[in-house]
Image (cartoon, coloured by chain):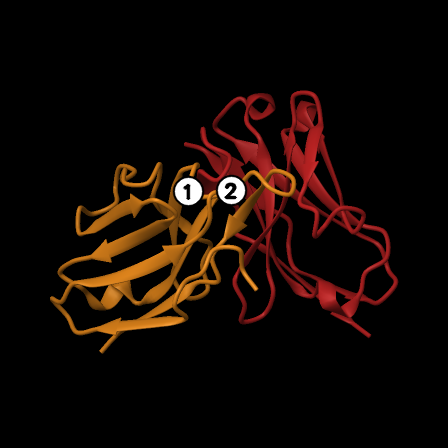
Amino acid sequence: QSVLTQPPSASGTPGQRVTISCSGSSSNIGTNYVYWYQQLPGTAPRLLIYMDDRRPSGVPDRFSGSKSGASASLAISGLRSEDEADYYCAGWDDRPSGRVVFGGGTKLTVL
Amino acid sequence: EVQLVQSGAEVKKSGESLRISCKGSGYNFGTYWIGWVRQMPGKGLEWMGIIYPGDSNIIYSPSFQGQVTFSADKSINTAYLQWSSLKASDTAIYYCARQTSGWAEIAYWGQGTLVTVSS
């Protein structure tokens, strides 16, 4: 059971907008930043969103992050076939002892 | 360019020991935390803990405390993940990962090391 809760799957057709949710608590993303990672098949994860809603250089602006309270979302607009991947949210959890926690991951399928 | 290059895949038997490595380049190795992340077959990412190569300060995730050992040699820009007695359940890909600023902000990842443990 992951500390951060994500839907196991999501899907969309090319050009659509999809969102992936991440639910936590006051000990993690409710008070600390949330981060999003993309993992393409057979590759290492890649940082997609940091500090709730900021994009590293090189990440297309089709990707955006938002947070409200202890819930966060990743939105992907103008969906493309190459967006088919696993997506993970992550954050620092203050309890019971400090550690990084990941969501269980969401597999995005582009139909 | 920041790079993390990990050692190659390993095949071991239960009960054997193992140390895998992660060599950093393109930055001051001693001044950034290096973390380890496990990914079991077909599963998600799990944070194992983190080490500061500058002074070998370590934070283990409670789930991995006592199960693995982190170390680092800043003179050769290398971090290590070690097991004293492997179990079949240790079969996974292990990634080393460099923090940027926030604890969960990992901008740089190694390519991963596949560890296969047979019983």
Q: Residue B105 carries which label?
A: none
Tell me the residue at 48%/37% (across/down).
Answer: B3
The answer to whether residue B19 is left or right of residue A105 is right
Residue A49: x, y in percent?
32, 44
Mark 2 surroundings within 10 Å by alpha-carbon count, few (fewer than 14), some (14 through 19), many (20 or more): some
Q: Which of B115 and B45 is in front in this view?
A: B45
Q: How many marks?
A: 2
Residue B107, placed above or below residue A62: above
Chain letter of disc 1?
A: A
At a point 82% along the width and 75% down the height, the residue shown is: B119
- Dot label at residue A27: 2
Chain letter belonging to callout 2: A
* Residue placed most toward the observer, B79 or B26: B79
Check disc 1 and report the residue beneath it: A30
Q: The orange chain is which one?
A: A
Q: What residue type is labelled 2?
A: Ser
Residue drawn at 27 percent across, 47 percent down? A65
Question: For numbered disc 2, what is the local secondary structure?
Answer: loop
Residues at badges 1 and 2 in contact (C-beta under 8 Å)?
Answer: yes
Q: What element carries label 1?
A: loop
Horizontal and vertical percent for residue B64?
Answer: 72, 50
Looking at the rendering, in which quadrant would you find the N terminus of chain B?
Answer: top left
Q: Is residue B56 above or below residue B63?
A: above
Amino acid residing under circle 1: Gly
Q: The red chain is which one?
A: B
Picture quadrant where residue A108 is located: bottom left
Front position in the image: B37 or A65: A65
Alpha carbon separation for disc pair 1 and 2: 6 Å
Residue A106 lies, with reference to residue B60, above or below; the image says below
